[in-house]
Image: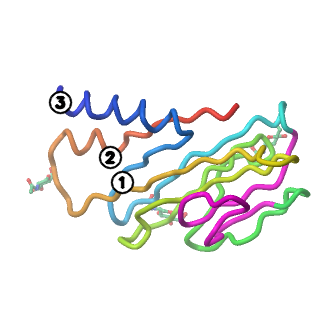
Amino acid sequence: LSSFLVTASSLFTALTSSAGSLVQGRLGQNITMPCQYSVEKHGTTSVCWGKGPCPVFRCSGEIVWIDEQQKIYGQSSKYHLLGNVSQGDISLTIVNVKDEDAGAYCCRVEIPGLFNDLKTDVKLVLQKGEQNTSILDISAHFICPMYLN
Ligand SMILES: *[C@@H]1O[C@H](CO)[C@@H](O)[C@H](O)[C@H]1NC(C)=O
Ligand SMILES: *[C@@H]1O[C@H](CO)[C@@H](O)[C@H](O)[C@H]1NC(C)=O
Ligand SMILES: *[C@@H]1O[C@H](CO)[C@@H](O)[C@H](O)[C@H]1NC(C)=O
């Protein structure tokens, strides 16, 4: 267990320093990938979620996006924004995750001006099968928080 904790804390350091997060879960779960921004600081703005790492502009493989009027596009039976979007909680929930959902995601908050966008790379890692070990159960709920400022 202690080697797991060391690994987890060094991952935490590595990932938070690049404004990213690691989310772990299992096939069939509903998984929420965290993303937030400060509405007090930036006002409400447009946001996109894409499959794949954050590109230079916008999101590649756009899944869900929010325009400047805070209208939400792209939600489906699979993808939901369950947080309070008007308070800057733009966490994306994937219902009943499948193998192909694993991998990189980008949450991008568009702030006016060149290269001001708040980009968060999220990595979704899925564990297979129904294992009963407590270490895996801990890691299944291990989420690195991220800070966007
Ligand atoms: C996942 O979300 C769907 C749709 O909201 C719901 O019907 C289902 O019960 C949830 N499953 C779990 C395991 O929470
Ligand atoms: C979201 O936050 C706003 C502002 O605090 C509040 O007025 C609204 O009721 C909240 N909506 C939900 C669905 O919680
Ligand atoms: C996992 O736990 C469940 C319920 O506690 C038990 O029925 C099952 O046999 C266990 N599976 C393994 C592989 O140990």
Picture residue at 68% right of the left edge, 50% below the top? 90
Q: Nearer the viewer, mark 3 or mark 1?
A: 3
Q: Mark 1: which amino acid? A: Gly
Picture residue at 15% right of the left edge, 49% below the top? 132
In percent of width and height, residue 39 lies at 81, 37
Query: Is label 3's Cβ within 8 Å of ligand 3?
Result: no
In percent of width and height, residue 12 lies at 41, 33
Q: CA distance from mark 2 to mark 1?
A: 5 Å
Q: CA distance from mark 2 to mark 3?
A: 17 Å
**Disc 2 designates what residue?**
140
**Disc 1 designates what residue?**
25
Which numbered disc covers residue 3?
A: 3
Q: Are marks 2 and 1 in contact (CB under 8 Å)?
A: yes
Q: How many marks?
A: 3
Q: Nearer the viewer, residue 86 or 149?
A: 149
Q: Where's the N terminus, which quadrant?
A: top left
Circle nearer the N terminus (3, 1): 3
Label 1, secondary structure: give it: strand
- Mark 1 Cα-neighbour bin, 10 Å: few <14, some 14–19, many ≥20: many
* Residues rendered magenta in the picture: 43-66
Circle nearer the N terminus (2, 1): 1
In percent of width and height, residue 144 lies at 46, 37
Q: Is residue 28 found left or right of 146 in the rendered image?
A: left
Picture residue at 56% right of the left edge, 35% below the top? 146
